[in-house]
Amino acid sequence: MMRTPLACSSTLAIACLGVGGCSRGQEPAAELAAPTAAIEAPAAGAAGPDPLIDRALLFGNPERTQGRISPDGTRISFIAPLEGVLNVWVAPIGDLGAARPVTSSTGRGIHQHLWGETGKHLLYLQDTGGDEDFHLYSVDLASGEVRDLTPFDKTRAQLVATSEEEPGHVVVGVNNRDPRLHDPYLLDLGTGKLSLIEQNDGFVEYVADHELELRLALRQRADGGQDVLQRTPAGKWTEFSTIPQADTRTTRFLGFDATNENVYMLDSRDRDTAALVRVALADGAKTVLYEDPRADVTEVLIDPSSHEVLAAGANFERLDWHAVASTVAPDLERLGAVLGPDWMRLASTNGGDQWIVVDNRPESPTTYYLYDRSDRSLDELFVTRPELIGQPLAPMSSEVIPARDELSLVAYLTLPRWTDPDGDGRPRESLPMMLWVHGGPWARDEFGYDTYHQWFANRGYAVLSVNYRGSTGFGKEFLNAGNLEWAAGMHDDLIDAVHWAVEAGIAEPDRIAIGGGSYGGYATLVGVTFTPEQFACGVDIVGPSNLETLLSTIPPYWEPILNEFAARMGDPRTEEGRKLLQERSPLNRVAAIQRPLLIGQGANDPRVKQSESDQIVAAMQEKDLPVTYVLFPDEGHGFARPENAMAFNAIAENFLTNCLDGRAEPIGDALAGSSTTVPAGAGYVPGLEEALEGFEPTIKN
């Protein structure tokens, strides 16, 4: 299986609304010169507020990111700007100054890459304009040739598996025959030849062994669960096991052991939290390798040569590593002592003796290290955003908030530094607050460096992110408590967290905003429609407004798992389900809106179509309600181009000054180089009309 993640190998794995954010070691890209002036707020304490951190330092392109080590340990690759656009670079190990770019993208840039197992090729995925029709590309490092390995129109490629034992080949899924299903092909990296393994007649995921033979496959059931099938030596698929609907988001395959006769899984069947298990294909017998009663096992370190599980980690409030193999215990102790518990291994050599690890503590920019297991040396490779060193970054605290039905909600709080001089995680007096809601919804917030938390806190706001029911990582009972609870129990959790923050003296009740991307955008629309007096304003990024139209326009490769959406959201194929979807759609409650709304949308979004934003903006305009609509014609589900991210965030922070009275850099020339269009409501944001005067959008795909 793959040494490092490049893309989800199954349709199921990506079937969520979640907008990509600042996950460990991966940062959104953006770059633009920072304005020189600033709007200052009155000092909150005797020492006064911290200086403003320039938006460009937070949201501009990272200097370097996504470090990967070659299979033989002689080179390192990373993503870094080339003439302002993110590209892949390669350097000899220990000499980043000798790095050279091996790609030359001039549009949206490259955001995902890994080494081919031979060490002769680098692989990366790239789409056009955010349409998520990803093509798989290779770079021949000897000749410099860049090749589109899946050169088909309107096709989304998925990298299914790579293997050290079959270094010259990979298995790739391609949906050019049927947009709903990915046919698996064996791909020769040397020649680019694709050889069909089989026609996919209904599987949502394949699992290959170390010989790149397809051994297992998952097929969606009518009840939203999955059948697991095993392939016989004769090539026939036979039933192996089932995954009930309640377990589909907490059970998945990881890969095979050295014998190719046992498969590693994260498995929540017959338990609440997902355990790391080894399953024998001969009889289905399970061996539990590690489990945590508080949280799902989510992190697993597997030796790439022996295919032995080394360590596993579960994350309740913070990541907690456990040595499965005794040989790795000294490594965990060494890394934990230097980096704390929240480090991650992102890549390793084929021999497993050298690791790329990332340190992601909240109050410092993400840092990459080379760890050598032979002598346990830890050498810094690079800092993603070195210009943030010395900037006033704020610490983060974890909180466990009781919901009204006594569920425990793990949340993360960041305060402006000057408001919490004793560092106890409570301000001296209550503050305006941003409730920042994660996407998915089948995802989670984690402890660590978070660009949005740092940005909002530096502008003078308390920032609270809550793992509401339906979030992943806390066991299937917690996740499934979110079923059919969109705009109901899931929103109640957010409101309970807001009330907690007010009662704790953290938030001023009249100056609380809600915002987020994707499901977080939907939660924002729910906040201003279902609880119209709770929030002072909202920032919705690519959020669906109408759950009926959302499900009727899902990408075709999500259609095989519509049954799971129906079980978790409401079934659009039944009268009862349609009624529920209508009741939970913010579009149908527009008349209740009382507070200003900012909406950001990518025109090419395949998950949450532009129409989701268009229709609620039109409905608000018809009722003369205050809405500002920012539309990017060259973006998809989130803003990948740095110029666009910078432009939207400049608009957003100035929008927030009207309702939260915080600080902001003026918009100034922050739109330069972006594709920003503002179809509605420019006058509601200070400085936006002036910034648009004479501005011409720059579109890049």
Image (cartoon, grey):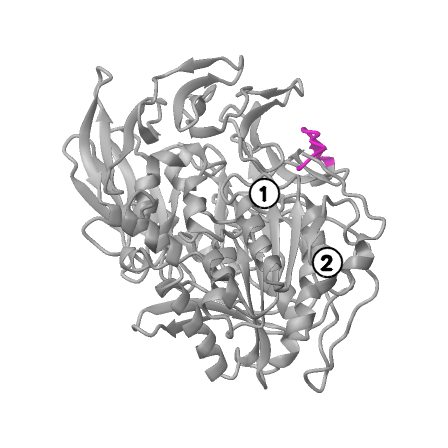
Visible in this render: residue 528? no
Q: Amino acid at mark 2?
A: Ala
Secondary structure of the residue carrying numbered label 1 = strand
**In terms of image quadrants, where is residue 85?**
top right
The structure residue drawn at horizontal position 48% and vertical position 78%, both measured from the top left corner, is 501
- Can the viewer see residue 590 in this picture? yes
Q: Position of residue 447 (x, y in %)?
A: 49, 62
| Residue found at the very far front of the displayed protein | 622
* Location of residue 394 in the rendering, given as x and y in whole percent from the top left corner: 61, 69
> Which residues are the magenta region?
98-108
- Asked if the magenta segment contains residue 124, the reply would be no
Q: Foreground: 638 or 25?
A: 638
Q: Which residue is mark 2?
A: 682
Residue type (three-letter) at the residue carrying disc 1: Gln
**Mark 1 near mark 2, Cβ–Cβ under 8 Å?**
no
Q: Give residue 475's mark.
A: none
Magenta span includes 99: yes
Give the label on residue 66, or none: 1
Q: Nearer the viewer, residue 623 or 638?
A: 623
Where on the picture, by quarter, is residue 171? Answer: top left
**Most extreme residue toward the left, as rendered?**
283
Q: Quadrant of residue 1?
A: top left
Q: Position of residue 277 (x, y in %)?
A: 25, 44
